[in-house]
Amino acid sequence: MAASTPPGAVPGTAWFTLPAGAGRLQLWPQKAAFDPDLGLLLVADAHLGKAVSFRRLGVPVPEATTTDALARLDGLLQATGAQGIAFLGDLLHSARSHAAGTQAAVLAWRQRHPALQLTLVRGNHDRHAGDPPAALGVQVVDGPLRLGPWALTHEPEAVPGAYALAGHVHPCVVLGGRGGDRLRLPCFHFGPEAGVLPAFGPFTGMHALPDQPGQRRFAIADDHVLALPASG
């Protein structure tokens, strides 16, 4: 595994490549990855409708989080020219995410991108929320879904003959030393057999994965993806 900078690299992004150039991902600070060879945008843990789910339970949380997520998708589609999006689980947060306002916003977004191929690899939240409405035209599958060199899953797992890409964990890195300030940043985490994408959705918890030999981590700091030193 390696980090590289192909010609025409976009400032603020980084690249993760498989050995011998078997596959490559452009890592975006908007918390998504893009495979230029497949024309595919990869998004984990969007959790659309999470804010309305919490508000219906009486928990005060920010509004317009779904609108913000859809606007970030618009920006990524324009920047990458992606022909499809694969959601690595937890597209909707809960059954309460089927609220009229949330569904209207998502449907309006879909109508702006009628030719876009959408695929959802079911996650644990999707099993509770139910599949997206048929009007959204989302192909829904159980993982692992093999596409190119990748095996798309929700929960991290090793898949023979492929490099697995997952979500679910909401990975982060913890920067700072003992006795000093510590900073938690969302990250892309790539191990020897599987990689984990950061959570695309807002106000999600984060989990620092343990170090392992050969891992690569890319921290997201504001509008930049930063390659961290490789583990031995």
Image (spheres, rainbow, N blue to C red):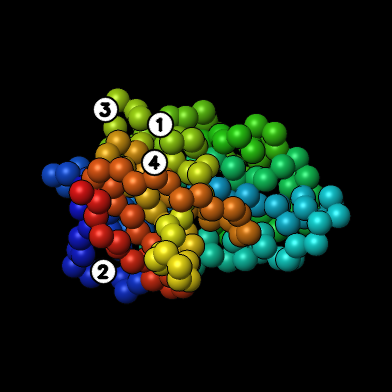
Asked if labels 3 and 2 touch by Cβ distance under 8 angstroms, the answer is no
Q: What residue type is labelled 3?
A: Gly
The residue at the far front in this view is 179
Towards the viewer: 73 or 154: 154
Q: What residue type is labelled 2?
A: Ala
Asked if labels 3 and 4 touch by Cβ distance under 8 angstroms, the answer is no
Q: Can residue 117 be seen in this view?
A: no
Residue at figure coordinates x 35%, y 59% from the top left:
218
Asked if labels 4 and 1 touch by Cβ distance under 8 angstroms, the answer is no
- Judging by the rendered image, the residue that carries numbered circle 4 is 165
Helix, strand or loop under label 3: loop
- Judging by the rendered image, the residue that carries numbered circle 2 is 9
Compared to residue 220, the image places residue 111 above or below, namely: above
| Residue mark closest to the camera, 2 vs 3 | 3
Q: Which amino acid does label 1 sit on?
A: Glu
Neighbor class of circle 2 (other Cα within 10 Å; few <14, some 14-19, many 20+) is: few
- Judging by the rendered image, the residue that carries numbered circle 3 is 161
- Judging by the rendered image, the residue that carries numbered circle 1 is 157
Please provide percent x and percent y for residue 214. 23, 45
| Residue mark closest to the camera, 4 vs 2 | 4
